[in-house]
Image: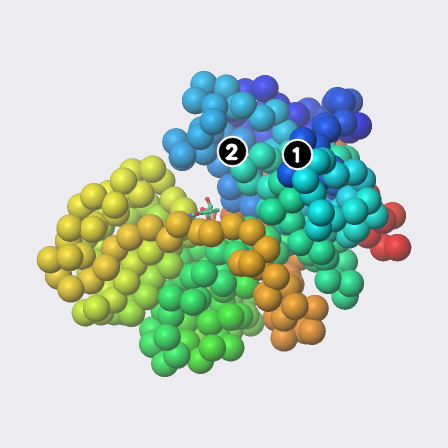
Amino acid sequence: MKAVVRDRYGPPEVMRLEDVAVPSPRAGQVLVRVVATSVNLSDWEGLHGSPAYARFGGLFRPSRPILGSDIAGVVVSVGADVTDFTPGDEVYGDILSMPGGFAEYAVAPAHAIAHKPAKLSFAQASTLPQSGAIAVQAVARAKPGRRMLINGAGGGTGAFALQLAAAAGIHVTGVDNAGKLDFMRSLGASHVIDYAAEDYTRTGPYDLIIDLVARRSVFSYRRALAPGGTYLIVGGTTRALLRVVTVGALIGALTGRHLSVLAVKQGPAQFSQLAECCADGSVQIHIDRVFPLAEVPAALTYVGTGRALGKVVVLVDPAADSA
Ligand SMILES: NC(=O)c1ccc[n+]([C@@H]2O[C@H](COP(=O)([O-])OP(=O)(O)OC[C@H]3O[C@@H](n4cnc5c(N)ncnc54)[C@H](OP(=O)(O)O)[C@@H]3O)[C@@H](O)[C@H]2O)c1
């Protein structure tokens, strides 16, 4: 099969398209013929091995040569003990624990995938599992009428989270680069901030801050929180993460705020309901660009350099997606 592989951490140039063996599913796993894979910032982090948590499972060299975790495709075969899926089923899910989606075939843990809603194309379905799960769990922490801020809101996760927050009656502020301000407004942001022009931690205060790209000190996060408010880091630098779980937790406890990590639960229970909302049109899926498998390096660069409005999809089998 064709796959985009790499054998070391580095820039997109370390990746190449190669012929490799089709993987075999073990007990509890499913072999999927991949039709579409969406790109997440976690792919870019896994490519570079940075932040440090992206080297989980491979400190010096990547333990898995193929990246890509949000897949949608068709079940080809199932391993022992798999009862929920049979060959021919159309499925989608996040295989972050064993990535391999930038390929014609990928193995998925059966518990990580779900049957694809018929109304969603494979490309659309592939955008949901990781970004959707984060967005749902982030917005679940907010309360109607309260002030929420999402830092990094113009990307894949933010595009879902802004819509969910606005629909729930939450006053939501989106922070991202200048090219994404109109996009965030169109998704329901009540207020937008260009992070290059204004320091969001000097605005507010906010009842809930969801930070997808944390890089600041815990003192600035604390400053931006209303009394009783919560700051949750979802992604960002290792330094920011470590500061939040140590000094941040202490400062929060001393000042009546809460600074912590949003440890995102994965799996269909986290994204299936959002998929139904997308299927019935109450939530929109924004696919900015679609790349062929051979252009995975360009697709990752597009997301990693912050140009994508919403999601980017790698269409592995265009004919199957339009069927
Ligand atoms: N906690 C967990 O369990 C868990 C699980 C899975 C994933 N994650 C994390 O969740 C995050 C999801 O991100 P995503 O896939 O939605 O990313 P994305 O689509 O790349 O969106 C991130 C956005 O943030 C913007 N940005 C970058 N630096 C910024 C800054 N300093 N201030 C404001 N905005 C900034 C980017 O644009 P520019 O680059 O132009 O600024 C981009 O628009 C990732 O960090 C991933 O590692 C966490």
| Residue 216, position as x, y percentages in the image | 28, 48
Query: What residue is pinned by disc 1?
Result: 27
Residue at (77% x, 66% y) in the render: 119
Q: Disc 2 on helix, strand or loop? A: helix
Q: Could you say which is closer to the camera, residue 27 or residue 235? A: 27
Residue at (41% x, 76% y) in the render: 170
CA separation, marks 2 and 1? 26 Å
Residue at (15% x, 57% y) in the render: 253
Question: Foreground mark, 2 or 1?
Answer: 1
Q: Could you say which is closer to the camera, residue 310 or residue 21? A: 21
| Residue 137, position as x, y percentages in the image | 45, 61
Q: Could you say which is closer to the camera, residue 172 or residue 251? A: 251
Q: Quadrant of residue 258?
A: bottom left
Verify CB contact (< 8 Å) between mark 2 and mark 1. Answer: no
| Residue 238, position as x, y percentages in the image | 34, 37
Q: Which mark is residue 36?
A: none
| As drawn, 236 above or below 187 | above
Looking at the image, residue 321 sits to the left or right of residue 268; the answer is: right
Q: Amino acid at mark 1?
A: Ala
Q: Is residue 120 visible?
A: yes
Q: Quadrant of the N terminus?
A: top right
Q: Amino acid at mark 2?
A: Gly
Q: Quadrant of the C terminus?
A: bottom right
Looking at the image, residue 44 sits to the left or right of residue 262; the answer is: right
Query: What residue is pinned by disc 2?
Result: 46
| Residue 52, position as x, y percentages in the image | 39, 31
Residue at (27% x, 40% y) in the render: 242
Mark 2 or mark 1: name the one nearer the start of the chain: 1
